[in-house]
Image (tube, helix red, strand yellow):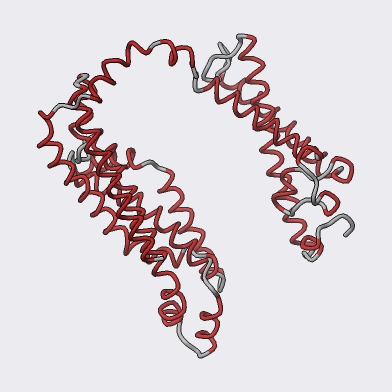
């Protein structure tokens, strides 16, 4: 087809239709976001909209109808852009789903309508975020006096909490270690089910891939702090709840990292082993596993490093570790003891970062 890139020209009519549908969906979402944010900024500066974005005094049903009109207008705009792309240039959705038109390759962003739209969308997002998050640089720059006590305590740490801090710091490290150790075998098994290149054989395997990926994405989307609150209500306050919270999140994170590494393996050894008539487990054992073990080890060590940092925050809600005694001292304003605990955490994280970096260098 004229104007298509070489890759797009080789697609079947069905693939082009699917790509076009994806482009329209992406463009509809982007245009709806742009319209909604533009309206939000206009109403915010006119004083008719609160800082959180809700229309002042408006009924919820009217809000829903209003945003329905925005979605409809965005869909119409996406359709027009895709129908008249010969004159308007490739839309953002078209460029993402099918690649830009051949005539646009090599053009700078400011030479295309798509580039200007993305630039405006970024600006709208920034200013909308500024208002929604209620950024107040004036307060930050003029109220240093309130922070003087905090800074004084942090630079003059107290030794009263040193012993207890060291004991709970050890618990923090082991809390992260146990969560990572429990996550390794589960993530290792799930990663093969979540690798696209290993699940193309049948409709069942593709369904397993979709379910596994979706489940891991959902699990990873929920912060460890939320998982900690869930497990605290389940098993009670203490480090075991923290281990479970970090374990769940680590399984999802490691499954993603492991599966993406499996998807990037060299297919040659796998094809060679398949040609010998080997069974699926033999193909995985001799064709896949030897290629992924070194990066798997590197990812695992890096995850342990992350879990040590996360375990500090987990302790704020009763998940054990040094955060369990850090939170009350912050609430009471005992900044000297806070400074001691913060220094212990910082030194530990720094040492672990050095050690894990050295180990990853040796593995890779």
Residue 50 place in picture, x, y as percent: 54, 14
Q: Residue furthest bottom?
A: 276
**Which residue is rendered at x = 29% and y = 21% of the image?**
151
**Which residue is rendered at x = 25% and y = 19% of the image?**
152
Residue 342 place in picture, x, y as percent: 25, 33
Residue 300, quarter of the rendered image = bottom left
Given residues 358 and 119, the one toward you in this image is: 358
Given residues 260 and 14, the one toward you in this image is: 260
Horizontal relation, residue 197 to residue 248: left or right: right
Q: How many marks?
A: 0
Horizontal relation, residue 290 to residue 329: left or right: right
Residue 22 place in picture, x, y as percent: 70, 50
Q: Quadrant of the N terminus?
A: bottom right
Q: Quadrant of the C terminus?
A: bottom left
Q: Is residue 340 above or below residue 287?
A: above
Horizontal relation, residue 112 to residue 270: left or right: right
Q: Is residue 270 above or below residue 357?
A: below
Residue 143 place in picture, x, y as percent: 39, 11
**Which residue is rendered at x = 48% and y = 53% of the image?**
214
Residue 47, quarter of the rendered image = top right
**Which residue is rendered at x = 50% and y = 65% of the image?**
195
Residue 256, quarter of the rendered image = bottom left
């Amino acid at each position: 087809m004229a104007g298509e890139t070489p890759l797009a020209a080789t697609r079947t009519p069905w693939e082009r239709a699917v790509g076009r549908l994806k482009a329209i969906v992406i463009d509809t979402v982007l245009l709806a976001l742009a319209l909604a944010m533009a309206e939000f900024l206009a109403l915010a500066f006119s004083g008719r909209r609160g800082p959180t974005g809700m229309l002042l005094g408006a009924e919820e049903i009217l809000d829903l109808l209003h945003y329905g009109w925005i979605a409809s207008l965005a869909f119409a705009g996406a359709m027009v852009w895709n129908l008249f792309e010969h004159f308007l240039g490739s839309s953002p959705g078209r460029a993402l789903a099918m690649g830009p038109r051949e005539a646009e390759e090599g053009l700078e962003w400011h030479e295309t309508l798509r580039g200007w739209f993305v630039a405006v969308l970024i600006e709208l997002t920034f200013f909308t975020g500024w208002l929604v998050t209620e950024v107040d640089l004036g307060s930050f720059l003029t109220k240093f006096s309130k922070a003087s006590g905090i800074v004084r305590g942090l630079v003059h740490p107290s030794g009263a909490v040193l012993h207890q801090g060291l004991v709970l710091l050890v618990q923090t490290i082991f809390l992260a270690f146990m969560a990572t150790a429990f996550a390794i075998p589960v993530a290792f098994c799930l990663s093969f089910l979540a690798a696209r290149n290993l699940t193309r054989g049948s409709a069942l395997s593709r369904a397993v891939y979709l379910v596994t990926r979706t489940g891991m994405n959902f699990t990873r989307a929920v912060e460890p702090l939320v998982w900690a609150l869930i497990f605290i209500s389940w098993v009670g306050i203490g480090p075991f709840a923290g281990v479970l919270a970090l374990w769940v999140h680590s399984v999802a994170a490691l499954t993603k990292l492991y599966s993406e590494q499996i998807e990037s393996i060299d297919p040659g050894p796998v094809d060679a082993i398949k040609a010998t008539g080997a069974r699926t487990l033999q193909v995985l054992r001799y064709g896949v596993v030897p290629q992924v073990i070194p990066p798997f080890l590197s990812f695992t060590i890096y995850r342990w490093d992350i879990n040590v940092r996360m375990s500090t925050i987990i302790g704020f809600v009763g998940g054990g570790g040094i955060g369990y005694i850090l939170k009350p001292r912050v609430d009471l304003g005992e900044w000297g003891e806070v400074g001691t605990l913060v220094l212990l955490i910082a030194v530990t994280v720094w040492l672990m970062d050095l050690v894990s970096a050295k180990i990853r260098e040796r593995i890779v």
